[in-house]
Amino acid sequence: MNIQNSPQVAVIGAGPAGSYTALQLAKHGIKTMVFEEHKQIGLPSHCAGHISIQSLKTLGLYPLESIVENTFCAANFYSPQGTKFTLRLNCPVTVALNRTQLDQHLAKQAQNAGAEFILNSQVQAIHIQKGTITGLKVKTNNNTHTINTPIVVDAEGISSRLLRQTGLTPLKASGLVYAIETDVDNIENIEEHAVEVYFGKSYAPGFYGWIIPKPDGTAKVGLATNQGHPRNYLKRLMTKHPIASKQLSKAKILNTNYHAISLGGPIPQACSNGFLAVGDCASQVKPTTGGGIIFSLTAAKEAADVTNQALIRGNVSVETLMTYQKRCNKLFSFDVKTMLQLRHFIDSLSDEKLDEMLRVCQKLGVDKALRNVTEIDFQGKMLLSVATKPAMIAALAYFGLLYLHHS
Ligand SMILES: Cc1cc2nc3c(=O)[nH]c(=O)nc-3n(C[C@H](O)[C@H](O)[C@H](O)COP(=O)(O)OP(=O)(O)OC[C@H]3O[C@@H](n4cnc5c(N)ncnc54)[C@H](O)[C@@H]3O)c2cc1C
């Protein structure tokens, strides 16, 4: 590997956003180098890897064979008091992926297409002269190199340390929740193809808790919170929640990871001269579920396409790269706005109101109205598609009243 050869595009980070951008760039024949600070791609893993099949298909990434740990056609939502609302869909709509293997799979595809991956290499700074990117400072095996490049794609994830150097507005600290993700064994009384979701301020204030089962009796269990330590809330969920405590009474935690999730919606501008931000560092994450993989991959495709056009035109100025921003706005704005309202609404509810809401959903038959849904990532459009069904009209009216009462 010759780190001295200048790439046309340097990508920071080999998570899904970085590797998928590199794959698309390499397919355009662009000399691309990806710098990843860890020795191995995909490790440590901090993510549940729960994503929609339809979105993977749209991106040309499905089937994923051995990477798929389980498929899901149902979700059980619980209030803190244990009231259950089940959403059962007509066919499997989501999968749980082995996140380490997904990252490695995307990187392999990018490598096969011609992208070069430099591991154990931390980008320490972006060189900018008179407002123009000139390269990167990279530390590899205790040696520091300067990499000359006209375009940097920043896919460094949520820390956004390098993005701040460009002067762009980083993600909002107020939109962060702090997550714990564990692998456990010996789960009980859990449907194999249903995801368990636990709402409520008593157990996961500002977010929710989850159990994502695997067919072998193990599961990914986690939660995120906007206050206190997530470890303490997980302990509470596992021991005190009327349902989860029974499902997890024999479970042993096998490993634990901590990571933040950005729920505040995308940053206002994700590009500047010779610079594009993709994925978590641009907060391209669903404010409702914290899912960021599909948004990251969708944005990565646009970033690579706009970069290709900029290189063809020999103009990597912010004016040219703003096409990326416009496309992201068009792709995400409506759905993100809807999801931000939903998040605000759920956060505003007391545990008692949440309990009432799940009872009302069950009573009105909201589950039946949603039975044919296949799209769960773009939730604004999904809600529009079902909004004329009688049960949904009644439920939305009820939610609207609750919302007005609590906002
Ligand atoms: C607990 C938890 C559960 C989640 N579950 C889901 C889920 O079920 N479904 C879903 O869609 N999303 C989920 N997410 C969100 C998802 O993990 C992120 O949205 C996704 O990882 C974003 O990908 P990314 O490539 O932008 O960033 P990352 O995956 O964080 O990748 C960034 C990469 O950049 C590298 N890097 C950072 N700085 C440097 C540097 N200076 N130099 C070189 N390399 C660097 C890092 O090592 C890393 O490999 C979850 C998040 C958490 C915290």
Image: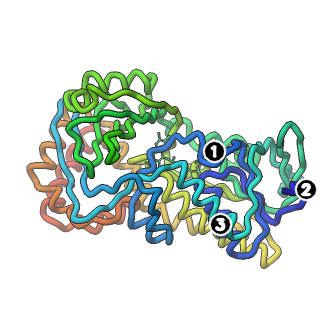
* Type of amino acid at the residue the image marks with label 1: Pro
Relative to 181, say whether 263 is above or below.
Answer: below
Q: What residue is disc 1 on?
A: 170
Mark 2 or 1, closer to the camera: 2
Label ID, residue 252:
none
* Type of amino acid at the residue the image marks with label 3: Leu
Q: What residue is disc 2 on?
A: 4
**Quadrant containing the N terminus in the rendered view:** bottom right
The earlier-in-sequence mark between 1 and 3 is 3
Give x and y (percent) for residue 222.
40, 35
Residue at coordinates 83% horizontally, 45% vertically from top-left?
138
**Is 130 left, or right, of 332 in this rendering?**
right
Specify the quadrant of the image occupied by residue 227.
top left
The earlier-in-sequence mark between 2 and 3 is 2
Q: What residue is disc 3 on?
A: 23
Secondary structure at badge 3 equals: helix
In the foreground, 401 or 92: 92
* Type of amino acid at the residue the image marks with label 2: Gln
Distance from disc 2 to disc 1, alpha carbons, whole Å, reads 30 Å
Residue at coordinates 52% horizontally, 40% vertically from top-left?
46
Distance from disc 2 to disc 3, alpha carbons, whole Å, reads 21 Å
Q: Residue furthest front?
A: 216
Residue 271 visible in this rendered orientation of the protein: yes
Give x and y (percent) for residue 202.
30, 26
The earlier-in-sequence mark between 2 and 1 is 2
In the foreground, 18 or 226: 18
Asked if the residues shown at circle 1 and circle 3 are in contact, with their CB atoms under 8 angstroms apart, the answer is no
Asked if the residues shown at circle 2 and circle 1 are in contact, with their CB atoms under 8 angstroms apart, the answer is no
Residue at coordinates 52% horizontally, 37% vertically from top-left?
260
In the foreground, 308 or 164: 308
**Is 133 left, or right, of 68 in this rendering?**
right
